[in-house]
Image (cartoon, rainbow, N blue to C red):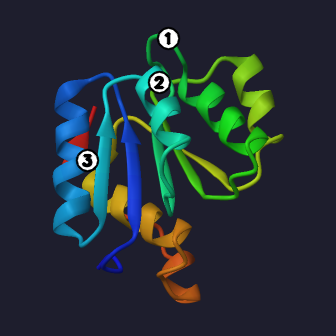
Amino acid sequence: MGELGKRVLVADDDEGVRRLLEEVLRRAGYRVEVCRDGSEAFKRLGSGTYDLLVFDHHMPKVTGLNLARMARLAGMAVPILLITSALEVQAEAQLHELDGLQVILKPFGIEDFLLRVERLLGGSSEEEQNTPPTGTKRVT
């Protein structure tokens, strides 16, 4: 269960995915703000403080990977969860440059997603971190 008050910024251009992630995170106890594209998310980064950033990689205007890079250049050490169905070789190579960034591949289960969020926010035990996540509901 999420720590009440932890702020999460979600950016995804797919309205269905964006609403689902918002609902799942809210029900888990997180305070959530959502953006419909990378440009909107970039503006929010400069006007708020977040405990976790969740970005879809393939968004118009500004990709999730570019948003992650901008957050790091701005000195933000917040964990980042990048959602993607596939990464290009060039993008995959750039992931190693960004500390605190993890990738979750679509399709993924909601339980998998929440477990990853909790791990990034430091809310799970060492035993939970070594247990592979499982789930039935899928995001595609």
Q: Quadrant of residue 56?
A: top left
Mark 3 or mark 1, which is nearer to you? Answer: 1
State the separation of the CA atoms marked 3 and 1: 21 Å
Marks 3 and 2, how far apart in space? 16 Å
Q: Give the position of the N terminus as an image quadrant.
A: bottom left
Q: Which mark is on residue 45?
A: none
* Relative side of 76 to 108, left or right: right
Say few, some or many: other residues with alpha carbon within 10 Å of mark 3 (under 14 / 14 to 19 / 20 or more): many
Whether 130 is drawn above or below 125: the answer is: above
Q: Residue 61: which numbered mark, if any?
A: 1
Q: Position of residue 5 (x, y in %)?
A: 34, 74
Q: What residue did someone put label 2 on?
A: 38
Instruction: Out of 68 and 116, give the one closest to the viewer.
Output: 68
Amino acid marked by disc 3: Leu
Amino acid on which disc 1 is placed: Lys
* Residue 41 is at least partly visible in this image: yes
Q: Which residue is mark 3?
A: 21
> Label 1 vs label 2: CA separation?
6 Å
The mark that comes first in sequence, 3 or 2, is 3
- Kindly indicate whether the residue at mark 2 contacts the one at mark 1 (C-beta within 8 angstroms): yes
**Residue 69, image x, y percentages:** 71, 34
Q: Viewer-proximal residue, 117 or 47?
A: 47
